[in-house]
Amino acid sequence: MKVTLTGFEQAQRKLASLDKQARYAASLTLNTLARYPVQDAVRHEMRDSLDRPTPFTLNSLSVTKRATAADLTAVVDFKQVAGGSRPASDYLRWQVSGGQRRLKGFEVALRSIGVLPGGYFVTPGQGAKMDAYGNVSRGQIVAILSYFRAFREEGRGFKMNSTAATRARLARGTRSRLGFRYFVGRPGGRGQLGIYQDVRIAAGVRELLPVFIFVQWARYEPRLDVQAAADLAVKREAAPIFQAALAQALRTAR
């Protein structure tokens, strides 16, 4: 008895073609997941877990590596920003993994001139002016750095630091603005160490407002679960996206 198999080579070619199209469909799926469901899920997690995240923070993600049929890996990461701006990864990683945070830029400036002691960080006090997102206003930070002459002015072409005359004018005030001065210390020798605004309410009447309090521990507990949010989006969306991608790949197979 003789048995002859026919069409076997054609079947092998068909299977190989199917494998090729399946890998192509998988790459389409990964790139679609990375562009939309994963980023949307992480933004939703940011809104739920963070206190009033800024638009910069919410838009800080991007696809930094696209998948191909040869390399089925797509990567969503924080954008790298140009011009010396601070990327979101610098401050969000403490929310993701916890631990002791690094000094912020203005803390480095205050420490460099001896205002902020070594081992201390700053936290907003009652006199801090907060913006819509719960952060100390940029204007107040600049004013304090200028008052304590913490700016490096080389190469700027203009003066950022206040002069003795400027500080004297601030202390006098005007008809529409109360006079004030900033100082570093512990009010009464027993208060919390920090930067205070000494405001002249009236003749002989003053008010001390703590702008920044110095603390020795600035430690975050993990609260932004980026991985769980991304995993849930993949589990929910991957199957239907892959089915559509595979159907498209098979239709367009050459």
Image: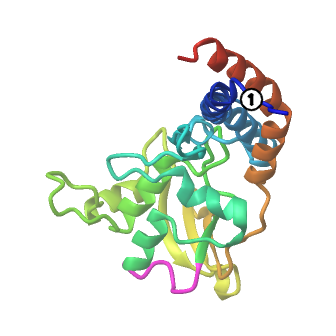
Q: Looking at the rendering, which quadrant does residue 24 occupy? A: top right
Q: Is residue 155 above or below residue 178?
A: below
Question: Which percent across, then down, holds residue 254?
Answer: 53, 17
Dot 1 amino acid type: Leu
Residue at left offset 14%, top offset 52%: 157
Could you say which is closer to the camera, residue 85 or residue 254? 254
Q: Quadrant of the N terminus?
A: top right
Query: Does the image show residue 160?
Result: yes
Residue at left offset 81%, top offset 50%: 228
Residue at the far top: name it. Answer: 251
Could you say which is closer to the camera, residue 178 or residue 50? 50
SS label for mark 1: loop
Asked if residue 163 lies left or right of residue 75, the reply is: left
Q: Looking at the rendering, which quadrant does residue 69 occupy? A: top right
Q: Is residue 118 magenta?
A: yes
Most common secondary structure along the magenta stretch: loop
Asked if residue 135 lies left or right of residue 157, the reply is: right
Q: Is residue 17 above or below residue 133?
A: above
Question: Which percent across, then down, holds residue 114?
Answer: 42, 82
The region drawn magenta spans: 113-120
Could you say which is closer to the camera, residue 166 or residue 39? 39
Asked if residue 112 lies left or right of residue 225, the reply is: left
Question: Which percent across, then down, holds residue 221?
Answer: 78, 67
Q: Looking at the rendering, which quadrant does residue 113 occupy? A: bottom left
Query: Does the image show residue 203?
Result: no
Residue at left offset 62%, top offset 49%: 135
Q: Is residue 121 magenta?
A: no
Residue at left offset 71%, top offset 24%: 6
Question: Which percent across, then down, holds residue 209?
Answer: 64, 62
- The residue identified by callout 1 is 5
What is the crowding at mark 1: few (fewer than 14 residues within 10 Å), some, or many (at least 20)? few
